[in-house]
Amino acid sequence: MQNLVQLAYIVFLFVPISALPATLPDEPVIRSVGGKTIRLPAPVGFADGTQKAGAQSKAAEQGTPAEKRFLALFAADIDLKKISNGGTPDFDRYFVAQSMRQSESITMTQDQFEGTKKVMRLIVRPWVPLTKSTLQDSADKATKSIASQTKGIAAEVKVGDVTTQGIFDEGPNSVSITNFVNYQITLNGKVVAIPMVISNTTLLIAGKVIYLQVCSDFKSTADVEWTQAASKAWIGAINAANK
């Protein structure tokens, strides 16, 4: 549920990025989860950024909690264009997909998923703030990865308050919540605060559970509304691509 990997991408704001291979917007990312083929279409205005090379790619992998498997990252077209032109991307909005390693072999029925949603309704509000230590561990792994592969960059990430707005959407095969996380990055002695809003979805596709994150810098309620609307649209696109 709360399996955030965005720490690995926040550092993209500060580390030089190599150019990405081009990927057609209408080509879905295809991953095998527990022997089932899962198609992950790019959200409108975004494209597959999974092939990012060098320190950033390794940081993304290492910043993913050990129990999760990183499936895909979708970055904004405008950010990928900046990278191609040798510029610095913002990465203020992006999409992430993951699976749970231990449960990939399990095929879940619709009735079982209804049970999962029932449990989430009960525990989401008291449980989300308790994930702070997990997020800090992911942050430490991501920054350690970057430190080992870059020169002249000293970075430290601290996780602040972790709160939730609770469940904002439910579908027959999905349940989505909105969380808020405050990060503080110290980069070569300069402190930068980055509050983020993340709409997290647990999605049942072909009997397999995957986890979706729609992430945005949090500046106003418009960012919350964007993540929620984008999350609903992405769920619809994934459902359509896997019929």
Image (spheres, rainbow, N blue to C red):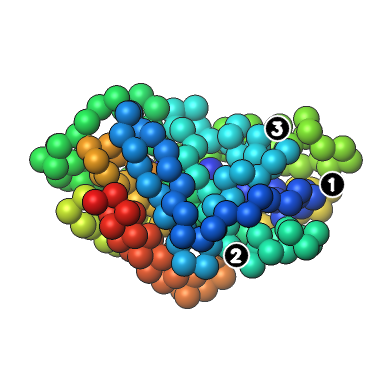
How far apart are the two marked residues, 3 and 1, measured between alpha carbons?
A: 16 Å
Nearest to viewer (mark 3 / mark 2): 2
Earlier in the chain: of badge 3 and badge 2, it is: 2
Amino acid type at mark 1: Asn
- Apparent side of residue 207 relative to residue 217 in the rendered image (left or right): left
Question: Which residue is label 1 attached to?
Answer: 188
Depth check, front residue: 146 or 110 = 110
Nearest to viewer (mark 1 / mark 2): 2
Question: Which residue is label 2 attached to?
Answer: 77
- Apparent side of residue 82 relative to residue 99 in the rendered image (left or right): right
- Apparent side of residue 209 relative to residue 114 in the rendered image (left or right): right
Earlier in the chain: of badge 1 and badge 2, it is: 2
Depth check, front residue: 185 or 230 = 230
Residue at the spot x=78%, y=63% of the render? Answer: 85
Q: Position of residue 113 (x, y in %)?
A: 18, 41
Amino acid type at mark 2: Asp
How far apart are the two marked residues, 1 and 2, measured between alpha carbons?
A: 29 Å
